[in-house]
Image (cartoon, grey):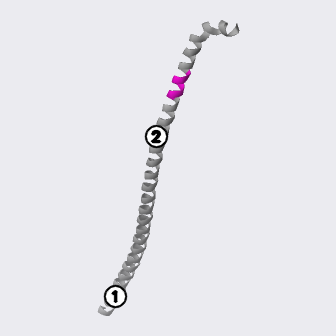
Amino acid sequence: MQLLSQVPMLPKLQSKIKTQQSYIRRTSNLTQDFGAVNSKLTQQICVCMGQLRELDQKAERVELQVNLNEQAMQVISRNLTKIRNFAVNTFASQRLFHF
């Protein structure tokens, strides 16, 4: 008797079941799409990390070159000072001999 009283509800229940199945399909599709996007993003992040490592290594090489250039400039500056002092001393000593 109770089963017969629920028969009028059957079309509504079937409609709800179809709606839930549709939600499940959409959720499954979204999950698959998310997985694909996540995979692509992970690959791109790995590529970017590799590029950052390369740039970091290049920056280290440039920094080393700058340090070497600075040291070379200091040596050149010291040598120029020595040459200038030698020239001044030589000129001064020649002037003394001429007088």
Q: Position of residue 59 (x, y in %)?
A: 43, 61
Which residue type does callout 2 highlight? Ala
Q: Is residue 45 above or below residue 67?
A: above
Location of the N terminus (image quadrant)? top right
Q: Which residue is mark 2?
A: 36
Q: Residue furthest left?
A: 98
**Label 2: element kind:** helix
Residue 6 is situated, as x and y percent measured from the top left of the image, at: 65, 9
Query: What residue type is disc 1 on?
Result: Thr
As drawn, 2 above or below 51: above
Seen in the picture, residue 53 relative to 76 is either above or below; the reply is: above
Along the line of sight, the residue nearer the viewer: 52 or 31:
31
In reply to whether residue 69 is colored magenta, the answer given is no
Residue at image location 65% in from the left, 7% down from the top: 4
User: How far from the left and from the top, in percent, is residue 40?
Assistant: 44, 44
Magenta region: 20-26
Which numbered disc covers residue 35? none
Of 71 and 99, nearer the camera is 71
Assess disc 2: are there few (<14), some (14-19) or many (≥20) residues with their C-alpha within 10 Å of its C-alpha: few
In the image, is 2 to the left or to the right of 24?
right
In the orientation shown, which residue stands out farthest toward the bottom? 97
- The residue carrying pointer 1 sits among few (fewer than 14), some (14 to 19) or many (20 or more) residues within 10 Å by Cα, namely few
Q: Which residue is mark 1?
A: 90
Residue at 31 percent of width and 88 percent of height: 95
> Which secondary structure is most common in the magenta stretch?
helix
